[in-house]
Amino acid sequence: MRVLEMSRRICSLLSGGKDSNYALYRALREGYELACIVGFIPRREDSWMFHVPYVPVVLLQAKAMETSAPVFLLEVSGVKEREVEEAARELKRIKEVVDFDIIVGGGLASRYQLDRAKKIASIIGVDVYTPSWGVDQEEYMRLLVREGFEFIVTRITTMGLPPRFLGKIINYRDVEEIIALSEKYGFNPSFEGGEAETLVVYAPHYQKRICLRGRKKSKSEFEHELIVEEFWLGDPGTQCINIID
């Protein structure tokens, strides 16, 4: 969804994952000015609106970008609809001290999330920019790798996606395998339905790399997660992901 050209200052709703990071990257590439970053931390794991795992790493991602924009991490209940009202209230408070005209989100196909983002924007009197809305999701996954996004899978909650993808930087071959598996097992190839969660460790708008150490944990036959024990920043050329199976 496009926004008015007169609007230039953005507040990025950043979760740490690939979609919100790519949306921010697109906005910066198109000349928008980053006014603030907001990460919402739901208290429930079944939030309808917000990404759950490792949202606090947004602070480290902001440092990796070397941005001077303020970063806000805010808790919401995670309860359907109530969390939307809470997010609007918190963003309205932020807008009283930070001047911005647009909120930037990473939605791809969820009508629920888009409608709620528009509702929040209407309440606080700003526009919405969702540059990836309606894209072909298979091509989108290829685009992320082609444009230099490095992301790992931190959680899997669907049949057909093997735990070996946990903690691995997803490359072209992985993307093609994920697409093939999605066709076979019927899950969304970009994980828009919550089949998996991701974390960006490097991107074109980063000056530093996110490093981490962790281990894999299987909770059930089709539910697996990455338990991260430590995060830190490294140089762009550093390979610094240490995962124990």
Image (cartoon, rainbow, N blue to C red):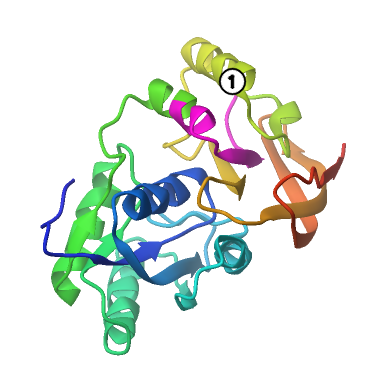
The answer to which of 183 and 31 lies nearer the viewer is 31
Residue 163: percent from the left, percent from the top? 73, 30
Q: Which residue is mark 1?
A: 172
Count every numbered label the image shows and give the total: 1
Picture quadrant where residue 133 is located: top left
Q: Decide: is 17 above or below 62.
A: above
The residue drawn where x is 62% and y is 59% is 54
Compared to residue 172, the image places residue 156 above or below, namely: below
> What kind of element bears circle 1?
helix
Please state if 76 lies on the left or on the right of 232 as rendered.
Answer: left
Residue 219: image location, x then y, percent: 74, 41
Q: Is residue 163 left or right of residue 93?
A: right
| Residue 145 is inside the magenta segment | yes
- Against 232, residue 113 (above or below) is above
Q: Is residue 148 above or below residue 23?
A: above
**Chain part drawn in magenta:** 143-160
Q: In the displayed structure, does residue 127 sit left or right of residue 201?
A: left
Question: Magenta segment: does it hold 31?
Answer: no
Residue at 41%, 50% (x, y): give it: 25
**Label 1 environment density (alpha carbons within 10 Å; few <14, some 14–19, many ≥20):** some
Q: Can the viewer see residue 24?
A: yes
Front residue of 125 and 115:
125
* Residue 189 can be seen in this image: no
Q: Amino acid at mark 1?
A: Tyr
| Residue 143, quarter of picture | top left
Corner quadrant of residue 244? top right
Picture residue at 35% right of the left edge, 49% below the top: 29
